[in-house]
Structures are given as structure tokens and as C-alpha cells.
Amino acid sequence: MDNQIKRTYSFHYIEGFRPLLVSLIGTKECEKIEQKLLHTPASKFDAFKNCLSNLKSHRNTHAHTHLNNTTPQILSPSSLRTQRKLIGDALLEIENELRALGY
């Protein structure tokens, strides 16, 4: 598992985070958690996935600036704090679901 974590560089849910979760608990349990969180009205899970995708696009823009002649947009500190809070809240939701399943 440590090697898989070290090889994960993506800010994307499907390509980065979900495979780690599946490795830990299996596809069936992962899908149970996803479905429960997606159908919980106050859940931050869907926003978490969108936030990771947004961070991925910004990361790619900055990592590949040599490919174009434009100045990349930089996220404001307040925007990054908001995203960090959202990600943290969603990770706590996932952790709570893992604990409820006995992990």
C-alpha cells in the first residue's frame, strides 16, 4: 500500500484517490460508501470530487507552462483555504463511513 500511495500523483478522484480506497476495502465496499455519501443531502462528497478535478486542472496548467505563452491563473489564498476545508470535511465523511464499516 505504501508503494501505491507513493506512486499516486493525481489530484483526481477516479485516477488517484479511488484506486487507493479500492485497494484498502475492495470495490464493493467503496461503492457502498460512494452511494451512501452521494445520497446524503449534507454530504460534501460530490463537491470533493469536483474540487479535486479543479485542483488537477490548475496543477496541470502550472506544471506544463512551457507548452503555451500565456500566464496561468493563480488561485487566491482564500479560494485554496475554502477548497482545503471542503476536502478535509469530505475526507472526514469518508473516514466516518470506513469506521462504520469496521475499518
Image (spheres, rainbow, N blue to C red):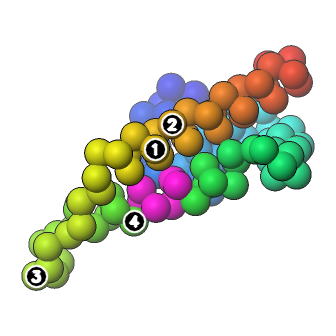
Residue pointed to by mark 3: 69
- Whether 58 is drawn above or below 90: the answer is below
- State the residue in front, 18 or 48: 48
Would residue 72 be seen by someone viewing this image from the given angle? yes
Q: Determine whether the residue tagged by mark 1 lies in a helix, strand or loop.
A: helix
- Whether 71 is drawn above or below 69: the answer is above
- State the residue in front, 42 or 37: 42
Question: Quarter holding the C terminus?
Answer: top right
Would residue 7 be seen by someone viewing this image from the given angle? no
- Give residue 45's position: percent from left, percent from top: 70, 47
Q: Determine whether the residue tagged by mark 4 lies in a helix, strand or loop.
A: helix
Residue pointed to by mark 4: 57
**Given this view, does label 4 or label 2 mark the residue nearer the observer?**
2
The residue type indicated by label 4 comes to Ser
Left or right: residue 20 versus residue 73 is right
- Disc with the residue nearer the chain's start (4 vs 3): 4
The residue type indicated by label 3 comes to Asn
**Given this view, does label 3 or label 2 mark the residue nearer the observer?**
2
Q: Magenta segment range? A: 51-56
Circle number at residue 82: 1
Magenta residues: mostly which secondary structure? Answer: helix
Q: Determine whether the residue tagged by mark 2 lies in a helix, strand or loop.
A: helix
